[in-house]
Image (cartoon, rainbow, N blue to C red):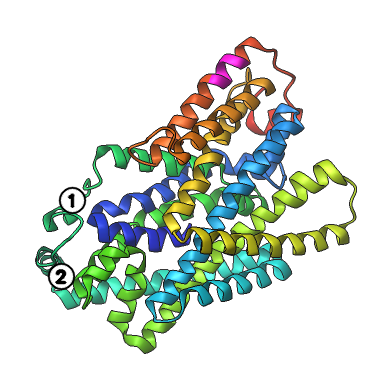
Amino acid sequence: MVVAFILGGASWGATYGLGGIWYGFACGLGLLLLGLTLAKPMRALALYTVPDVLEMRYKSKAIRLLAAMLSLLALVGILGAQVWAASAVFEAIGLPGTAGAVFATLIFIAYTAFSGLWAVALTDFIQIILGSIGVLVAVVLGLNKVGGFEGLRTSLSAIPNLPQAGGEYFNFMSLGISLFALTLAATVMYTLIGQDFYQRLFASNDEKTARKGAIYSGVLLMVLSFLPALAGMLALTLSSDPQAIIDSPKTAVPKLIITVFGSGVGAIFVAAILAAVMSTADSLLSAATSHVVKDLYQSFIEPEAEDKKLLNLSIGTTVAIGVLALVAALTIQGIIELLIYSYDIYTSGVFVPLLLGIYWKRATKEGALLGMIAGSLVAVVGITGLVSFSYWEYIYVSGALVSAVVMVLVSLLTSPEPIDKELQKVFELS
């Protein structure tokens, strides 16, 4: 979330201008909706993973297995995107990107494997605050350097080869209606079902904390969503080589910070951004490990495994997944590409069965399973290019629509089983 909000938002700011706020806004909106709807009851269930919830609802280990595999695939890819983002930060400050990716991977593997979710939560808070302060101050100082918003407008208009006309950079709808709507829908969809978000909810002290944390985080992200977009615009105007940022907009934030603060102080804030990237990575790594340990090993291989054995398995799995994510990052070499591949299949397959399972008593395990398969296949068809989609967000939405149609039809043709009493109580499904 942090790397996408800061680096991704600035990347969109360098490309779309103020229209780039909508990704960060969508992240915040998703968290707000999560807090208002699912956060409290999900925490009340005291489970570990989203597949846990699906198995409880549908009484099907096949659904749990498929959901866990889809989520694990997504998390490895998203984790790879964080690794590649760390590499981009190192490149922006003149260090070897590949070596930086390897170093960052080793660090977050180490403190995730040996410190657990407490370290994740603690480092999240510190690093996000430092990173946000750095971007905020950089934007304020940057605006002062260019002469305020009018100076920014004038400076942008003078830059050749911009992705769009300089005047469009101050248009909040520069993305276009389609991309705007799809960005909101797709991002909110993943936020409502992502294991990396539920990992924090399940680790909260109680239901109220989970609910408030999601709501406050969502509101904060929505309020601050304009900062990364402005950072991307300012990076273009203050850079001695704006074409380099146009060609690689993911480097906008670290380059802006170095430009505004200088190499000394700037390096401290860039380090905070890098730490925020790693903070996101450690929570993803912890979430992926939980799938292997809880949803695969304990559920299918050794349900009564001792705590010590599970701890050792968690450490080994954390290392293995971290290395796999590093390999994926170095192979694909692109933040956006990794995120696209990762989000699409999981969201297309799991979103509808989870939401309909919670809010529709008539949903059946046969409908959920076939809906998951159908939605995932649509995503695979889109990713492989067998069917061309104008925007990658169409893959999310199309997969979810197909999943919904299949699930509803099959559920109406099959008989539902009694809903778990605890689930009934928590979600008031009785």
Q: Disc 1 on helix, strand or loop? A: loop
Closest to the camera, between mark 1 and mark 2, is 1
Q: Disc 2 on helix, strand or loop? A: helix
> Magenta stretch: dominant SS?
helix
Task: Compare residues 24 and 263 and report the one nearer the observer.
Answer: 263
The residue identified by callout 1 is 171
From this view, report whether residue 262 is shown above or below residue 89: below
As shown in the figure, which amino acid type bears the numbered disc 2?
Answer: Gly
What residue appears at the point 46 percent right and 74 percent down from the top-left corner? Answer: 97
Q: Over which residues does the magenta segment extend?
A: 406-410
- The picture places residue 289, in percent across and down from the top left corner, at 70, 55
Task: Compare residues 374 and 230 and report the one nearer the observer.
Answer: 374
What residue appears at the point 35 percent right and 56 percent down from the top-left corner? Answer: 223
Real-space Cα distance between discs 1 and 2? 17 Å
- The picture places residue 92, in percent across and down from the top left corner, at 38, 76
- The picture places residue 120, in percent across and down from the top left corner, at 62, 65
Task: Compare residues 213 and 86 and report the one nearer the observer.
Answer: 86
What residue appears at the point 36 percent right and 64 percent down from the top-left corner? Answer: 250
Left or right of residue 66, residue 220 in this image: left
- The picture places residue 428, in percent across and down from the top left corner, at 64, 27
The residue identified by callout 2 is 148
Residue 244: say if magenta: no
Task: Compare residues 126 and 64 and report the one nearer the observer.
Answer: 64
As shown in the figure, which amino acid type bears the numbered disc 1?
Answer: Asn
Residue 124: quadrant of the picture: bottom right
